[in-house]
Amino acid sequence: MKKIEELMNNKKSLMTLQGCLEEDINKAENELGVKFSEEYKEYLKTYGVVSFQGHELTGICNFDRLNVVNVTMQERLTVPEVNCNWYVIECLNIDDITIWQDETGGIYQVSPDMDPEKIFDSFYEYLESI
């Protein structure tokens, strides 16, 4: 299995913050009532949050628009039929599309006008595609 760093090393214009601690991850999971996938936890521990090539992935940080807790809570209000065990990994800002993940790693594309669609089986696959 590839590591997050291997995937990120190929991203142009990569900007990151400092990775976060396990206690920060546990707090975020508790606030959302979810369990993050192991690969998302690896990403959080390594980077906290990232931005590259026009993509801004959620994470644990002090920026409301990138903080996974804030973004997920806001998006749950926008699309209430989304599974309550999912969390947002990216807001695409195109047609109100958001990318969500479940604790097993599945990646879903959601917008207010469509049913959730599973697009990848893992965070790694999603990162490879963008």
Image: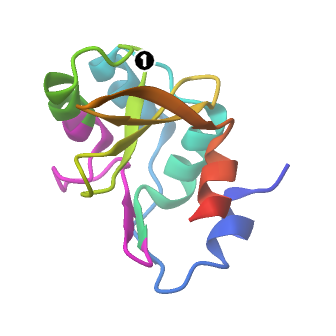
Residue extending furthest toward the bottom: 13
Q: Amino acid at mark 1?
A: Val
Q: Is residue 32 left or right of residue 13?
A: left
For the C terminus, the quadrant is: bottom right
At horizontal 53% and vertical 25% (from top left) the residue drawn is 102
Figure quadrant of residue 27: top left
Residue 57 covered by magenta stretch: yes
The percent coordinates of residue 68 (x first, y second) are 31, 40
Residue 122 covered by magenta stretch: no
Q: Is residue 121 left or right of residue 77?
A: right
Count of numbered tags: 1
Q: Is residue 41 left or right of residue 7?
A: left
Q: Residues within 10 Å of mark 1 (few under 14, many from 20)?
A: some
Look at the numbered disc 1 and give the secondary structure of its residue: loop
Give the colour scheme of this rendering.
rainbow
Q: Is 41 above or below relative to 125?
A: above
At horizontal 27% and vertical 57% (from top left) the residue drawn is 94
Residue extending furthest toward the right: 1
Magenta part of the chain: 52-71
Q: Main secondary structure of the magenta part?
A: loop
Q: Is 20 above or below relative to 4?
A: above
At horizontal 69% and vertical 50% (from top left) the residue drawn is 125
The percent coordinates of residue 97 (x first, y second) are 31, 45
Q: Nearer the viewer, residue 34 or 114?
A: 114
At horizontal 42% and vertical 23% (from top left) the residue drawn is 86
Q: Nearer the viewer, residue 80 or 87?
A: 80
Q: Is 36 above or below relative to 126?
A: above
Disc 1 marks which residue?
A: 34
The percent coordinates of residue 3 (x first, y second) are 75, 56
Q: Nearer the viewer, residue 11 or 60?
A: 11
The percent coordinates of residue 8 (x first, y second) are 62, 70
